[in-house]
Image (tube, rainbow, N blue to C red):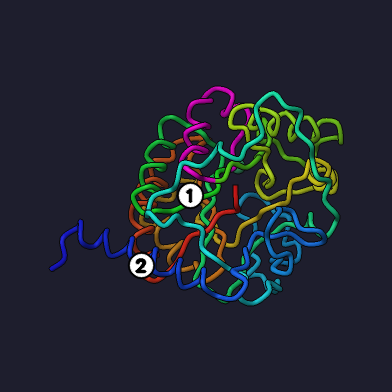
Amino acid sequence: MLSDRQITSRRLLLVAAGMSLLGAAAGCRSPWSGGEGGAEAGVDESALPAVPAGPDGAPGAVPAAQSGVPSAAAPGAASPSAPPSGAPSATASSSATAPGVVPVHKVLSEAESKPVYELDAARRVVALTIDDGPDPRYTPTVLALLQQYGIRATFFLVGENAVEHPALVREIADRGHHIANHTWTHPDLRHLSDTQARDELERTSDLLHRTTGRLPTWFRAPGGDWSPVSLKVAADLGMRNMGWSVDPRDWARPGTSVITERILKDVRPGSIVLNHDGGGDRSQTVAALKAYLPVLIDSGYFFTAPPN
Ligand SMILES: [Zn+2]
């Protein structure tokens, strides 16, 4: 029988072994690199996960993988980005622009602005995305769990929550997770004017930049409801758009076991998983994370997030 400590060690070793294996692969391309011109410096641009725009539905839009929308991701594009120590590294602010400096946005092309719903399916890589926080009731526990399993995740933060809890925002960043923009008030962007949408996105990017020194490079529309206006505004602000392919509808609080079962049933290589740590009672989500993260790791999955 293995003790809990031994099991955890084995998982961390597996993460480390997978990293070196994938790191040694030719190119070691990032699943997050952009289209024309690339969205991030220093990454191979040929690895764009060029998935066509998916359905534009209500919260819990039909996953691209299940709706017949093909994934056109380049083969061999994935690489895990969990740190070698097994715990997220605290490199958040080392290369960041100093707060107070006026950020310079790289305007993205239309091709670069297409929402990404899945990553390359050639490797057992999953992107865990956590929306609607930060929330002091749940985010610290989520962070502790991610640290325990050596997982980097992407946090899509809501501006009006981030402004209330700047220390928590900094902690997310300092633990090495990816900080992303999820609007200021979580509105339905399809009903907003250009000016209103720009205010929602720009205000949030500015706040996250001031708080962490990082300018967000990824955006997610509330409910996955992008609009032509929001796509244009995000492109102007240098943000690509991230959807999801696995939605356990945890926000509806269907029960911890239901959330866990939905994720374990639907997840596949290249999945982008949607979870929530804010916007209501997220205790079921936290409990589900405790249940499904070790199962995925033991199944050979690696977790990835965009580079910081
Ligand atoms: Zn949301």
Residue 243 higher or lower than 236, as above or below: below
**Dot label at residue 301:** none
| Residue at x-position 51% and y-position 50% | 153
> Which callout, 1 or 2, points at the residue further toward the start of the chain?
2
Q: Is residue 158 magenta?
A: yes
**Where is residue 116 shown, x and y percent of the image?**
69, 60
> Which amino acid, by three-letter code, is at mark 2?
Leu
Dot 2, crowdedness within 10 Å: few (<14), some or many (≥20)?
some
Q: Is residue 301 magenta?
A: no
Magenta residues, start to end:
156-177
Residue 97 higher or lower than 119, as above or below: above
On the question of residue 194 being in view, the answer is yes
**Dot label at residue 250:** 1
Nearest the viewer among 131 and 110 is 110
Horizontal side, residue 149 vs residue 302: left or right: left
Furthest residue in direction left, as rendered: 1
Horizontal side, residue 248 vs residue 294: left or right: right
**Helix, strand or loop under label 2:** helix
According to the image, label 2 marks what residue?
14
Dot 1, crowdedness within 10 Å: few (<14), some or many (≥20)?
many
